[in-house]
Amino acid sequence: MSEEFQSQFLKIDKTTSEPLYLQVQKLLEKLISKNYFDNKPHFLTEKFLIEKLNVSRNTIRLAVSKLIEKGLVVSERPKGIVVVQNSSRIMEETVSGLSNTEAAIKLGQTPITNILDFKIVNPPRFIISQLLLSNNDKVFYCKRLRFNNKIPLFINYFYIPQKIIPNLSRNDFGGRGYDQSLYFVIERKHDIEILMTVEEVQAVLLKAEDAILLKTKKGTPALSRRVLVYSRDSRIICYNETLFSNSYVMKGLVHKRRRL
């Protein structure tokens, strides 16, 4: 690392009230956001940071722990701190009430969708209970791989009762732009206004087939977000589940949903 680079970036201000660990965290996030580590997967060592920033080991470890929580780095002995592949592709915010497509476009990103499967099926028992269906009801099932800026970031599955949107078609969904958004298709193409969503997020381990799609290893930790979508007349119209890669980082801003 050049002296010029060190003098430009490796600076901590001990005269401010901002916690030292937070300054270190922001400094390292800045380096990651500038793609400094794209060709240098092995991160700076604790010893290097302690010496150059003149802070304690506990400060460095606390800052790094925050980066680990965000999915930006992992701690691997004896390598030290290692940047997660593609961790520079950060979603700066997730906007509650908006679809993933709407949020990505709002942030100036380029979302792309690859539909892997689309068909009418007899729903499994779990979906029957979630969507309050009878045993004779059929649903549209869709599995999609979603990209932002060409990076595979999440896998999306959804189930929609055939009796709710009988003429739903694979052709309703585009690969780019707003028409790849499930909410956009439901509202604009089928004239069903969405009232709200009820979401549940939990940690999971990726199965082999999902890990391959997200270009990672089987058993890698991921987030699963399960969503029930309600229409204006209070019907449950969709069960929507998304598996997020650990290179997808979410920061929350809450916006009231408005129809596009």
Image: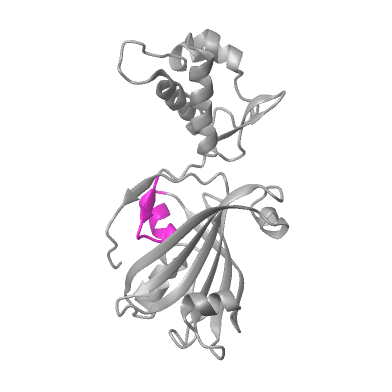
Residue 259 point in image, percent of width and height? 29, 68
Residue at 54% over, 82% down: 139
Q: Which sits in the foreground, 106 or 235?
A: 235
Q: Is residue 138 above or below residue 211?
A: below
Describe residue 160's horizontal placement relative to residue 229 as left or right. right
Residue span colored magenta: 93-108
Colouring chosen for the image of the structure: one colour
Magenta includes 107?
A: yes
Magenta includes 129?
A: no
Describe residue 240's horizontal placement relative to residue 115 as left or right. left
Residue at 57% over, 45% down: 246
Q: Which sits in the foreground, 232 or 193?
A: 232
Which quarter of the figure is the N terminus placed in? top right
Residue 140 point in image, percent of width and height? 54, 80
Q: Is residue 171 visible?
A: no
Tag count: 0
Q: Is residue 49 above or below residue 220?
A: above
Residue 152 point in image, percent of width and height? 59, 52
Please tell me in which quadrant of the rendered image residue 57 appears: top right
Residue at 38% over, 80% down: 190
Which quarter of the figure is the C terminus placed in? bottom left
Q: Is residue 20 visible?
A: yes
Please tell me in which quadrant of the rendered image residue 51 appears: top right
Residue 63 point in image, percent of width and height? 49, 25
